[in-house]
Amino acid sequence: MDKNAINAVLKKIRDTETAKGNPRTKEIVNRIVQDLFYTIEDLDVQPEEFWVAVNYLTEAGRSGEYGLIAAGLGFEHFLDLRMDEAEARAGVVGGTPRTIEGPLYVAGAPETLGEARLDNGSEPGEVLFMQGQVLDDGGKPLAGALVEVWHANHLGGYSHFDQSQPAFNLRRSIRTDAQGRYRFRSVVPLGYSVPPNGATDALLKQLGRHGSRPAHIHFFVSAPGHRKLTTQINIEGDPLLWDDFAFATREGLVPALVRVTDPAILDAYQVSAPFSSIDFNFTLHVDRPALPHAEIVRPRASA
Ligand code: MBD
Ligand code: FE
């Protein structure tokens, strides 16, 4: 079809708008509709293909997988890169890199001071200790910062979404102590994979891709007057470290994993088998009103 004829029909649709409604919504929706009309034209999308897509989106919504699809198609990573660039333009550089939140955070995890055990005491898997400080961009410890941590179990499943796990399993909020320190005991996670035969899985298969992530641990780190950090660290050595379906691995977020086998240390830590240990500090930036919001408001699960 001729581009002028396409533009004419786009105009006819747009001309039905009144002064009511939301200007921002109008701008975005009209742009997306225009881009999709052009896509249909340029790629000669057939009616059957269009209805496959409509049905696909319906099913994906029904199964609650849009968050996964947003991660898998790289949208969430792209939003990170845009935020990085906005900060860089404002002279905000360095600090702990951000990386995507993903769709599996649950609000309301138990909060403790300084340290926490993330599992209920009978969690299978290798014991993991992780510890460090929350610092400002001058390297000064931030006391009273909040470290929210969540990760998958030894099978790659997240509590709440995997109903076989206890409430808030492997999810805690830790308030840093007077020296800005946090510390937790947990178990080494396994990488997550999208639900087999679900909407995301089907899409990724069509794209000739896999739907797995390397093992990782999520964090929100916040402190008054500072930009909230959304990030993850990866478990060093995971075969998918740089082959993440959600594109979240970044330089600076792969701390060394130390294996502790010294019986005296195992004793001191009250652990009966060799464990892994990760040291990692979080560096936050001072917040400024001119910067885009670092705390992203979005619907989240809560319990
Ligand atoms: C996850 O665990 C995750 O972190 C992301 C980004 C997407 C899907 C599952
Ligand atoms: Fe995750």
Image (cartoon, helix red, strand yellow):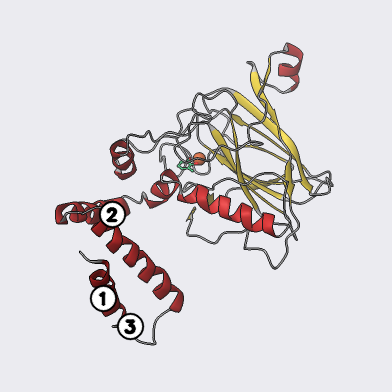
Q: Amino acid at mark 1?
A: Ala
Q: Please name the residue that numbered disc 1 is placed on.
A: 8
Q: Which residue is mark 2?
A: 57
Residue 47 vs 218, above or below: the answer is below
Q: Residue at x 36, y 49 (%)?
A: 65
* Residue 119, label in figure: none
Label 3 crowding class (10 Å Cα cut-off): few <14, some 14-19, many 20+? Answer: few
Q: CA distance from mark 2 to mark 3?
A: 26 Å
Mark 1–mark 2 Cα distance, whole angstroms, equals: 28 Å
183 and 65: which is toward the camera: 65
Is there a contact, CB below 8 Å, between mark 1 and mark 2?
Answer: no
Residue in the picture at 53% in, 23% down: 125
Residue 86 as seen in the image, left or right of residue 134: left
Q: Which sits earlier in the primary sequence, circle 3 or circle 1?
A: 1
Label 3 sits on what residue type? Glu
- Mark number, residue 17: 3
In the depicted view, which residue is nearer to us: 193 or 121?
Answer: 193
Query: Between tags 2 and 3, which lies in front?
Result: 3
Q: Is residue 205 visible?
A: yes
Count neighbours of disc 1 (C-alpha within 10 A) and say few if under 14, some if 14 to 19, many if 20 or more: few
201 vs 52, left or right, is right
Nearest the eye: 157 or 119: 157
The image quadrant of residue 201 is top left
Residue type beneath disc 2? Leu
Q: CA distance from mark 3 to mark 1?
A: 15 Å
The location of residue 218, given as percent across then percent down, is 58, 42
| SS class, disc 2 | helix
